[in-house]
Image (cartoon, rainbow, N blue to C red):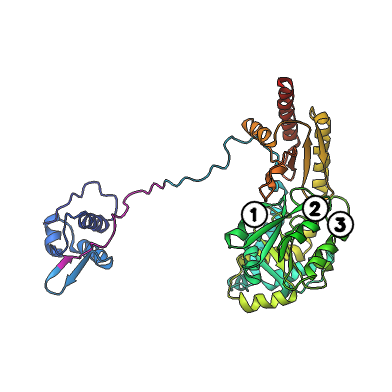
């Protein structure tokens, strides 16, 4: 006879009985084939209702722990093939995740996030409330594979006005982050392609390509952008680059080099250029240069941009513009995909652009970043580090390079500053081809950087490198 203690039971009674019987079955206390007491007998012996026992037995039957036979009763099933014992109580997962930082970071000179105070919360809130009140039916409709029409039209209108790019909205594909769009491009072009990446360069595209079994090769970067001779020496079918503002060097590719890259793409069928224009809106002096896509006459350029830089790092809305033949291929092959950005965000961003708020925001942020850049450069020039460093800057983007005049290895200086709460990121760490160089060049991202923090960092670096000089 099954007898259990019902003191201090903190779950429904039927659930408690179900768990106790299941536990006894799994640990062999009640062997297979054992006949269980009838509902009435079980209930009477334990002083509980038959309904409670019925619910417990029903749960055990549904999970296959016991069986029932008309007029014979309930029997324990043969469950010898069920491995292990189910977890009970709280789950304690012991998965070792890589630590983001060994040392706590007080000043992050490489932080590329946008400052929270710069996001247009009030306008965004007003628009999304209007969208919810007026577009309820549209919000609940499945999104088109390339994104809602209103957003693609708004992006196309913005591009013709501010980038000189004549684009059909049907060429635009919206996705949640450029990582997702890279995956679509791989499927469109095929995994047998060889992709050439800039080195030094941003490592995320390489990781996405390799995770999708795409072979990668590398070409160097000179003062005009990707080295065309290096590119020609590779077996690449596709080149992935950032001509407007290369990361991390900051180089802006001149028109002559752009036409050389287009000439390379047109030399063979099946060659393509992936143009990552990630922070092109923030050119400090003058308007942004015309993208490669805007001067491409051979349908060789796939253009990618994101709102993560222009609005906020956590706004995971990006888009790509496909040449006409690839756009048609996308709709033939990949239209079964659902758009990965919610309708709420798409309609809100569409209104934000159409009503001119995006243009106003960009203009305001250009002025803001221009002043911040000036203040930070002034802080460095007036700091104790002024005689030990040189700023290598460009008129585009939200970062510049700081050349530190020292014999200390990049890795050693980086680790030393990390131990003092300063996050420095050397340019030498961005070489994708495994080449290690002590360039003594360090990235200063100023989008979310406070001038007072810059002064603190300069003083800390100065103290360390001067102590090092005295030692040697």
Viewer can see residue 295: yes
- Say which quarter of the image contains residue 308: bottom right
- Say which quarter of the image contains residue 59: bottom left
Disc sitting over residue 282 in the figure: 2
Secondary element type, mark 3: loop
The one of 309 and 266 positioned closer to us in this rendering: 266
Identified at 79% across, 29% down, the residue is 385
Disc sitting over residue 254 in the figure: 3
Residue carrying label 1: 204
Count residues near mark 3 (Cα–Cα under 10 Å), then give few for <14, some for 14-19, many for 20+: some
- Say which quarter of the image contains residue 38: bottom left
Identified at 86% across, 57% down, the residue is 254
Secondary element type, mark 1: helix
User: Which image quarter holds the C terminus?
Assistant: top right
Find the magenta span and give its range: 74-93
The reply, left or right, for residue 198 in relation to residue 7 is right
Between the residue at mark 1 and the residue at mark 2, the CA separation in whole angstroms equals 22 Å
The reply, left or right, for residue 436 in relation to residue 166 is left
């Amino acid at each position: 006879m099954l007898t259990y203690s019902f003191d201090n039971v903190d779950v429904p009674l039927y659930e408690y009985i179900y768990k106790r019987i299941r536990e006894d079955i799994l640990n062999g206390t009640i062997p297979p084939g054992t006949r269980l007491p009838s509902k009435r007998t079980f209930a009477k012996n334990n002083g509980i209702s038959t309904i409670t026992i019925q619910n417990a037995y029903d749960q055990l039957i549904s999970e296959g722990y016991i069986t029932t036979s008309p007029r014979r009763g309930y029997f324990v099933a043969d469950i010898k093939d069920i491995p292990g014992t189910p977890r009970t109580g709280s789950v304690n997962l012991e998965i070792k995740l890589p630590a983001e930082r060994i040392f706590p970071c007080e000043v992050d000179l490489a932080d590329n996030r946008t400052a929270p105070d710069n996001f247009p919360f009030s306008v965004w809130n007003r628009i999304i409330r209007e969208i919810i009140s007026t577009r309820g039916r549209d919000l609940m409709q499945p999104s088109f594979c390339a994104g809602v029409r209103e957003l693609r039209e708004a992006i196309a209108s913005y591009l013709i006005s501010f980038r000189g790019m004549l684009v059909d909205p049907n060429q635009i594909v919206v996705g949640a982050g450029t990582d997702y769009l890279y995956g679509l491009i791989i499927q469109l072009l095929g995994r047998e392609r060889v992709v050439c990446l800039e080195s030094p360069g941003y490592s995320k595209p390489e990781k996405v390509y390799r995770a999708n079994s795409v072979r990668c090769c590398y070409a160097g970067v000179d003062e005009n952008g990707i080295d065309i001779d290096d590119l020609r020496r590779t077996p690449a079918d596709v080149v992935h680059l950032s001509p407007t503002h290369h990361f991390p060097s900051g180089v802006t590719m001149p028109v002559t080099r752009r036409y050389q890259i287009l000439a390379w793409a047109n030399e063979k069928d099946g060659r393509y250029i992936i143009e990552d224009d990630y922070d092109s809106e923030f050119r400090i002096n003058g308007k942004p240069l015309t993208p490669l896509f805007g001067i491409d006459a051979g349908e060789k350029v796939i253009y990618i941009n994101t709102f993560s830089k222009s609005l906020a790092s956590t706004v995971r809305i990006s888009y790509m513009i496909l040449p006409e033949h690839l756009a048609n291929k996308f709709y033939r092959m990949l239209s079964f995909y659902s758009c990965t950005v919610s309708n709420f965000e798409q309609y809100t961003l569409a209104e934000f652009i159409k009503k001119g708020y995006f243009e106003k925001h960009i203009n305001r942020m250009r002025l803001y970043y221009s002043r911040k850049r000036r203040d930070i450069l002034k802080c460095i020039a007036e700091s104790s580090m002024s005689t030990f460093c040189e700023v290598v800057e460009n008129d585009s983007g939200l970062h510049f390079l700081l050349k530190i005049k020292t014999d200390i290895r990049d890795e050693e200086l980086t680790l030393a500053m990390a131990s003092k709460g300063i996050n420095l990121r050397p340019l030498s760490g961005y070489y994708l081809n495994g080449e290690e160089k002590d360039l003594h060049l360090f990235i200063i991202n100023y989008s979310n950087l406070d001038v007072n923090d810059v002064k603190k960092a300069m003083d800390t670096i100065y103290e360390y490198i001067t102590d090092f000089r005295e030692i040697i």
